[in-house]
Amino acid sequence: MSSGYILAKDEPGPDEIVEALREAVFENPRLKKMPAEELARQLVLDGRLQQEPSPELVAEMIETLEAEEQGLEADELSEEGNPT
């Protein structure tokens, strides 16, 4: 977490948020296009999190997921071009 955001007492942590986002986006990829505030609420409404996380933290975790996806795509491309 690079933003320096300080979690509220009962707020879910970054790992918990990323895992909830992974599951939610896997089931509905359109969620990534939602504003972070709506997505934070949706994670609670779907029962993926018990407390609503800050929109700033959700936005940062979405960026983390996107970076992971780009890394996986790059790995797949390099494996395709490298016959073993």
Image (spheres, rainbow, N blue to C red):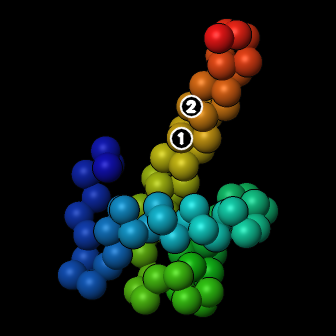
Kind of residue at badge 1: Glu
Question: Where residue 19 sits: x, y (%)?
Answer: 48, 65
* Amino acid beneath label 2: Gly
The label shown at residue 71 is 2
Residue at 60% in and 68% down: 23
Figure disc tally: 2
Could you tell me which residue is drawn at 28 percent across and 58 percent down? Answer: 5
Q: Quadrant of residue 15?
A: bottom left
**Residue drawn where x is 25% and y is 51% of the image:** 4
Tell me how far mark 2 sits from mark 1, CA to CA.
5 Å
The residue closer to the viewer here, 21 or 80, is 80
Residue at horizontal 66 percent and vertical 19 percent from the top: 79
Q: Is residue 34 visible?
A: no
Identify the disc placed on residue 68.
1
Q: Is residue 10 left or right of residue 25?
A: left
Residue 10 horizontal/vertical position (percent): 27, 84
**Around disc 1, counting alpha carbons within 10 Å, would you say few (fewer than 14), some (14 to 19), or many (20 or more)?**
few
- The quadrant the C terminus occupies is top right
